[in-house]
Image (tube, rainbow, N blue to C red):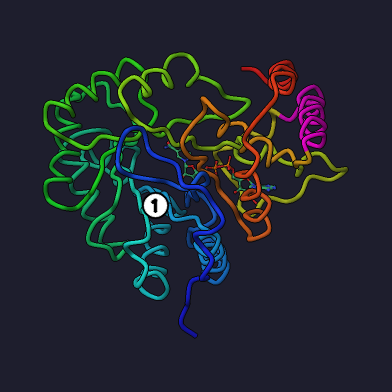
Amino acid sequence: RPYVAADDRYQRLDYRRVGTSGLLLPPISLGLWWNFGDNRPFDTQREVLRHAFDHGITHFDLANNYGPPHGSAEENFGRMMRTDFKPYRDELIVSTKAGWDMWPGPYGKLGSRKYLLSSLDASLERMSVDHVDIFYSHRVDPATPLEETITALDTAVGQGKALYAGISSYSPERTVEAVAIARDLGTPLIIHQPSYSMLNRWVEGGLLTTLDEHGLGAIGFSPLAQGLLTDRYLGDEPVERAVDRGSLDEGVLTEDNLERLRGLASIAKQRGQSLAQMAISWILRPGGVTSALIGASSTQQLDENLAAAGQTDFTDEELAAIDRLAGD
Ligand code: NDP
């Protein structure tokens, strides 16, 4: 049966402006880093993606290397584009990135023009789209002149293969340089994608202010610290992970840290939230980021997480109590 999106999909979330740009994003965006590779059933992926769009999530974030294996998340998303989302292409913000290792040899990683532009072409092909909405430099390449990297993003925009440009995990200093180059070229560099959670606050050391000063928006990735900031580790037996994440060290779950998580969960409970919901609400609080970029392996997780968007105000007492338990 062909997919028909829910009629009330735009009545659920308040969309937020990305910096001073014309682009709005949902408060909660869905990333396809894990759970959309070839190791997960397509039907489950489809269920989660449909559910997300039906509930107002208009933004799906990818990268060339998401999977596993590399490229497969984009391929699976491409299948979704063909079977389900094609009529809705103009209602979607699809992003991809290049920067981390993608293919062997010197042209399959980092920040050269050679790598970025060929990688974007391959991403478009895999995703069955003729453009992405945002194309990111996925990380700083200290050895390539920043002019070259930003000019490559500008070329992608000039070719109509990307509508906006973004940078990910750039320091405040590099961000300022990147913005200056983009301004000179007239590149719509409008968004920064940093990691941000109650347990990881590096963006508060200048990045958020810098973005604000220059009119850029921020989309914070891993607000749940890849699943640590949820109830899944707080029961007698941890809830099993959907995929074994090589990126997550569960060794950090010492008794001391579990005690902190329990403390945070009890603050959440007083707010009428789960720990996951409070973690998402917290990065969306006033002064926080434009959008929270989450992962999810089920529609249940999505439903739980989506509810966080409606409760982004915190009292000073709550913020102080959170800081006592979770700082970095
Ligand atoms: P999160 O911190 O949101 O972690 C998501 C994981 O937490 C889920 O996959 C799930 O684990 C678990 N989870 C989610 N909701 C719940 C819940 N309600 N209860 C219990 N467990 C829950 O984000 P990710 O680390 O997945 O990153 C999100 C996105 O950010 C990526 O997909 C990617 O788009 C982007 N990203 C960008 C990076 C960059 O360099 N620019 C780097 C990393 C991420 P399980 O799957 O085991 O069920």
Q: Residue 297 occupies which quadrant of the picture?
A: bottom right
Residue at which label 1 appears? 70
Instruction: Identify the residue at image location x=12%, y=46%.
Output: 158
Front-lying residue, 190 or 144: 190
Image x and y of residue 221, in percent: 50, 37
Left or right of 263? Residue 27 is left
Left or right of 255? Residue 108 is left
Q: Where 183 sits versus 162, above or below?
A: above
Left or right of 167? Residue 249 is right
Instruction: Specify the segment rendered in magenta.
Output: 253-271
Q: Where 291 sits versus 69, above or below?
A: above
Image x and y of residue 312, in percent: 62, 36
Quadrant location, the C terminus = top right
Image x and y of residue 197, in percent: 58, 30
Check disc 1: other Cα within 10 Å, few if <14, some if 14-19, many if 20+.
some
Total numbered labels placed on residues in the image: 1
Instruction: Identify the residue at image location x=36%, y=65%.
Output: 78
* Residue 247 magenta: no
Ligand 1, by image quadrant, is: top right
Instruction: Identify the residue at image location x=15%, y=39%.
Output: 154
Front-lying residue, 265 or 7: 7
Q: Where 225 sits versus 64, above or below?
A: above
Image x and y of residue 242, in percent: 64, 54
- Secondary structure, mark 1, is loop
**Dominant secondary structure, magenta:** helix
* Residue 256 magenta: yes
Front-lying residue, 107 or 15: 15
Instruction: Identify the residue at image location x=52%, y=50%.
Output: 34
Q: Amino acid at mark 1?
A: His
Q: Residue 43 occupies which quadrant of the picture?
A: bottom right
Q: Residue 217 occupies which quadrant of the picture?
A: top left
Q: Where 1 sits versus 158, above or below?
A: below
